[in-house]
Image (cartoon, helix red, strand yellow):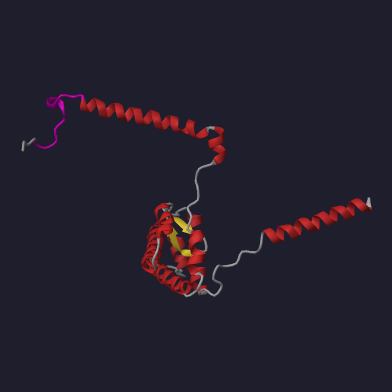
Amino acid sequence: MRRYRSYSLFFLVLLLSGCAALCPPETPLFPERPVACQDFLDTLDKKVHEAGVKDHASFSVPGFPYLRSNRFLSALKKTLKSDAQRAYWLQWMQQLDLAARDKEIRNLPDKAILALNAQEAGPPDRELLYRRVRSCSCELLSHDQTCLDFYQTLDPLVEIPDRYSFLMRAAGLYPLTSIPVIIATRNVRKKVRSRFKLDVDDLPVEGSLRTF
């Protein structure tokens, strides 16, 4: 009995040590970043998530809270050949993030805006919050760009996640979900065709007809 307990304890220790090796504690990409700006953007992301107002038109770049990308920019990185092209690509991703955050701030509830601005009362100042976002975005970008391995760290992270589910495709559920789309498309097509089959004299007229 003792022997089995010893074996169990031994395998448990191995399992825990293996997990510790495979799952190291998460550390920031650039540890010496301005803490105030990093914490502010992290808090803003948390408030946006809690309110369910995240803008899904673009994708956040992991580890770079001031950058967002899309499929075009993700594919574009493979064609960049000069420092000027990389700088423009980087600026594009920063502007994409700022545009998304502007939408998110406008959709946040007043209570969240007051909390982020450290206001106890008064009208929620969304413009003030957005200006702070812009300031922190530029400050973090300026800091990160001083690191020698900045682009080497950034490039592999500018990837767009695949939203397709392999399990659903394997189970054949995607063809099933396409059925209502096909039906709706056919109905619209019938309506459009019925309009084109009408004689010119029977077409509804808005305004006045003119011949050129």
Whether residue 168 appears in magenta in the rendering, the answer is no
Q: Which residues are magenta?
A: 197-208
**Count of marks overlaid on the render:** 0
Q: What percent of the width, then of the height, locates residue 67? A: 44, 62
The front one of 45 and 170 is 170
Q: Position of residue 77 (x, y in %)?
A: 43, 59
Any part of residue 197 in sight: yes
Q: Residue furthest right?
A: 1
Front in this rendered view, residue 33 or 71: 71
Instruction: Where is residue 154? Give x, y as percent.
Output: 49, 64
Residue located 44% across and 32% down the image? 178
Is 160 situated left or right of 200 in this image? Answer: right
Q: Quadrant of the C terminus?
A: top left
Q: Is residue 197 above or below residue 28?
A: above
Q: Quadrant of residue 207?
A: top left
The picture quadrant where one finds residue 89 is: bottom left
Residue at image x 22%, y 27%? Answer: 195
Residue drawn 40% across and 32% down? Answer: 181
